[in-house]
Image (spheres, rainbow, N blue to C red):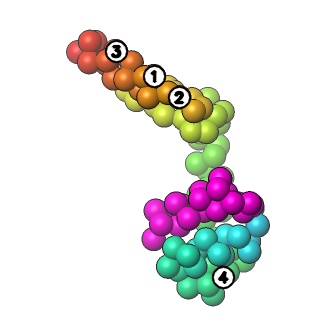
Amino acid sequence: VQMRFAKELFAMHFEGEADVSCHDDLVRAGVAAGMAEQEVMQWLESDDGGVEVDEEARQARDSGVCSVPTFEINGKRLEGAEDVSAFYQVFADIKSAE
């Protein structure tokens, strides 16, 4: 369900006009992903997960993450929208270092 929710939310945000901070849009994404509307609304109205999300965001900032997406592969970091050739180069560098 988590992956379906993420895909639905990304589609609504990037292909539509959904606001990922709007509870109505989050509920629509949750329902489209197969979750019960009441369950999504209750979770949004609670503080469940808030501490964990704040901690993950702090860890990302502390490690220098400032772009989305950010990929770290064997200590090499790719930030932002990268061409597939950048990934190829990282893997080639890792392979040649072995």
23 vs 29, nearest the viewer:
29
97 left or right of 79 in image? left
Residue matched to label 3: 93
Residue at (33%, 23%) from the top-left corner?
91
Query: Mark 4 falls on what kind of element?
Result: helix
Q: Amino acid at mark 2?
A: Glu
Q: Residues within 10 Å of mark 1 (few under 14, many from 20)?
A: few
Tell me if label 2 and label 1 are in contact, CB under 8 Å.
yes
Which mark is first along the chain, 3 or 2? 2
Report whether residue 4 is seen.
yes
Residue at (74%, 74%) from the top-left corner?
24
Question: Can you tell which quarter of the image residue 89 is in?
Answer: top left
Query: Mark 1 falls on what kind of element?
Result: helix
Q: Magenta stretch? A: 1-20
The mark lying in front, picked from 2 and 4, is 2
Residue at (50%, 27%) from the top-left corner?
83
Residue 56 rendering spot, x and y as whole percentages: 58, 48
Q: Amino acid at mark 3?
A: Asp
Q: Amino acid at mark 1?
A: Ala
Query: Mark 3 falls on what kind of element?
Result: helix
Residue 44 higher or lower than 12, as above or below: below
Q: CA distance from mark 2 to mark 4?
A: 38 Å
